[in-house]
Structure formats: C-alpha cells, structure tokens
Image (cartoon, rainbow, N blue to C red):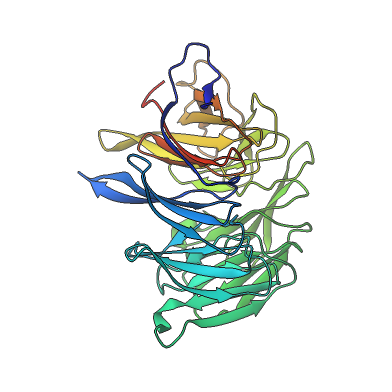
Amino acid sequence: PAPAPLRPGSEWPRVKWSVDLGACIDASPLVLACSCSGELRPALCVIGSHSGRLKVVAARDGRVLASFELGGRVESTAAASADGHTVFVGCDDGRLYAIDLCGRRIAWSISGGDHFKASPTVDASTGRVWIGCYDRRLYVVDPSTRPQGVRVQTVEFDGPIFASVVHHAAARARCAFVADLKGSVRCLDADTCGTLWRANTGAPTFATPCVVPGRGRQHGGFQVVVAAVNGHVLSLDGVSGSKLWEFAVGSGLPVFSPPAYESTLDIILFGCHDGVLRALDASGTLLWEEKSRAGSAIAAAPVVDVVSSMGTPSAVRAAYCNRDGQITLIEFRKLSKAENTGGGGGSCDSKGLRLVSEHILTWRMTGEVFSSPTLLSGQIFVGCRDDKLWSLLVPSRA
C-alpha cells in the first residue's frame, strides 16, 4: 500500500520512492543537500531504524548507496560534519557512531553508560559533537584528535537526556542549551562546557529547546523556548535564564513536539498530544491554532520551508505529522486587517498583522509516524512505522 490522499480525487502526494529498513522508523531523516543553479537540491538521505540498520540513500531515486549494521536499534536522528563527509548517530547499544560516507565504513565509535536516544548536534565552529545520554551525562566529542584517539568530555546532569543540544553564538559567549528528563534546562559555555545558568521547566522535557530573538533583539537579545510534558511552553532569557513568559495549552496534555521558530513570519510553531498545532509570537501570544483532522497526538517537530517568488519570500510552508500517520502541509501568510477580507486567524501580532493559513495537502501514511518530516524543494522525506523511508512529491501550489 502507498500513502493515500485524504482529499477525494487528489493526485498528490506522488510517491517518488520508498526504502525498507527492516523495522519501524522513529528517527527523522537527515537530508544532505547540494546547490544547483543557486537552489538547494536534496542529494543524500541518511536514516536508521529499530532493526539497527543505518542506510544512506540517493535522494533522487532511492538507491541504497551504503548500509551499516549497528549494535542496537536507532532512534537517534543523524547529524553531519561541516564538510558532509561524516555523519554521527546515537544507538541503543550505548554507542555514538561516526560513519565515513566517502569510505562507506564505520570510522569510529565511543561508548556511553546507557542508551543514546538523543540526536547528536555538531558545533559548526569547532566540529565537536554534542549528544546527551540516558546515563545522565552530556558527551562532547572532539573528532579532530584522531588518529591519536577521540577526545571525550562529559558533563553530569540531573536526569537522562533525550533532547538535542542547541548552539547559539551570543554576544558574550558561545552557548549550548541542554534540557533533561528532570526538567532541568542548562546553558553551557560551548568552549569550556562550564555552566552559565540553569532553570527548570517543572516537568520532564523531551523537546529540544529553540532559540528565538527576544527583548533587545536589535542588540543581540534572545530567548530560549522550551516545551514540557505538563503542557507548558516557557521562554527563558538567553543571558540570565530568568523566565520571560509561559504559555499553557488549554487541554493540559503533554508537549513532546520541539518548538520550531520561523524568522520570516516571526512565529513559534509546536504540536501537542491534543492533536493541535499552535503558533505563538515571540512574546508568547497565541496567533493561530488548529486541531488536525486526525485528532491524534503530534509528537514530532513541525518543519518549515520558505516559498519564494522572484527571489522574495512570499509565504511559509509547514509540514507536520500526527502519530496515527496523517501528514498535513499548510501554507502561512501574515495579512493586514485590510488584506484579511476573509476573516479567520487568531490574535494580531505586535505590528497588527494576522496569521492566516491555507491547507495545501493532507494524506495518510501506511503506519504510525513518530518522525519529523524533512521538506525541501517540493520533496518530503519521512520515516514511518511501516518500516519504510518514503520520498513524496508535493505540488508547488494548491
């Protein structure tokens, strides 16, 4: 069976290819892109599954270019080095693996004290790999010390770490933000790994933090937005860690979906276990919300892609997955009161603009989806619990 459109008579999405990974896929696909005539085009897709296999797939036609058998199931989304030659991925066997894409081999691995369910992050300034572990430690790995050996630094945390690390170059220091399952959120110096501040969400935090421009943004001010399983989304001042605002979903259900910031429209998008996708502005005001037709939980992060016309951003597309396998593609715009003749939308933002949406496409996969989709150049890549990685084509316009 293939993904089925929910709009009667629709020919979209079109299946480009699918690849079987032997067991269900919870990781999100890593898509490596190349520039073609000034436009980014997907080139390679890397993903692992519960079978312990990690596959490297040609984005164009789905050919499997390399396959690796790791020591346990893979829930971690892979991350790439700056040159794109190496990818890093965590595994349930308690190891972080480095895969040499050019040599098609496992270059090295390091051992942690428990499962690596978190996805690694590569510090673009230093090339160091940051990944949290269920042993309540953060591992900071420096691959540049090879062949003498990979240098590993660890930082103790209050609870297991499921979320990815987020880096940000602030005016005073390069920062790394880490959340754990005890609700602790910590800002570390990205060079020394020393703690700059710490805060607490009041509940376990699975969602990766999100850096958003904040008060004094013209002077480099920023905030760290964190979502927790008590249904609250908090904003913390990036410099001090003090709470700026807090938003509670009306249902009180958990938020596992990492918030995603989109700078063109200046909005924060996140899903919830109540099946509602919400958009906040940078001050925590609810601008828009919509309950998906499926109604089931949204566990993974929504993804955004800017639509341009004549080189100018004209709209923003967002794709998100419900756990039952429904995927929705929406297009957002901000309109003035005069332009918004059709009504709709939530509160206006600080400039008096209202966020409005248009449904482009909705379809259902052939299994549950815990993976975030990747959206690039009209192509969606998504892992599914039907054991397959799918590549789907979507229309350029409705």
Task: Between residue 178 and residue 287, name the one nearer to us.
Answer: 178
Task: Between residue 159 and residue 305, name the one nearer to us.
Answer: 159
Identify the image quadrant of the N terminus.
top right
Task: Between residue 55 and residue 354, name the one nearer to us.
Answer: 55
Q: Relative to residue 340, is residue 200 drawn left or right?
A: right
Where is 35 relative to 352, above or below? Answer: below
Residue 374, image x, y percentages? 46, 43
Where is 363 relative to 19, above or below? Answer: above
Residue 331, image x, y percentages? 47, 29
Task: Between residue 392 and residue 188, name the one nearer to us.
Answer: 392
Q: Can residue 265 be seen?
A: no
Q: Relative to residue 303, is residue 368 drawn left or right?
A: right
Q: Relative to residue 288, is residue 160 drawn left or right?
A: right
Identify the image quadrant of the C terminus.
top left
- Taking the view exactly as shown, the residue that stands out farthest to the left is 37
Residue 47, image x, y percentages? 49, 52
Residue at (72% x, 39% y) in the render:
273
Q: Can residue 196 be seen?
A: yes
Where is 49 relative to 251, above or below? Answer: below
* Number of on-image labels: 0
- Taking the view exactly as shown, the residue that stands out farthest to the bottom is 148
Where is 357 relative to 185, above or below? Answer: above
Residue 102, image x, y percentages? 32, 63
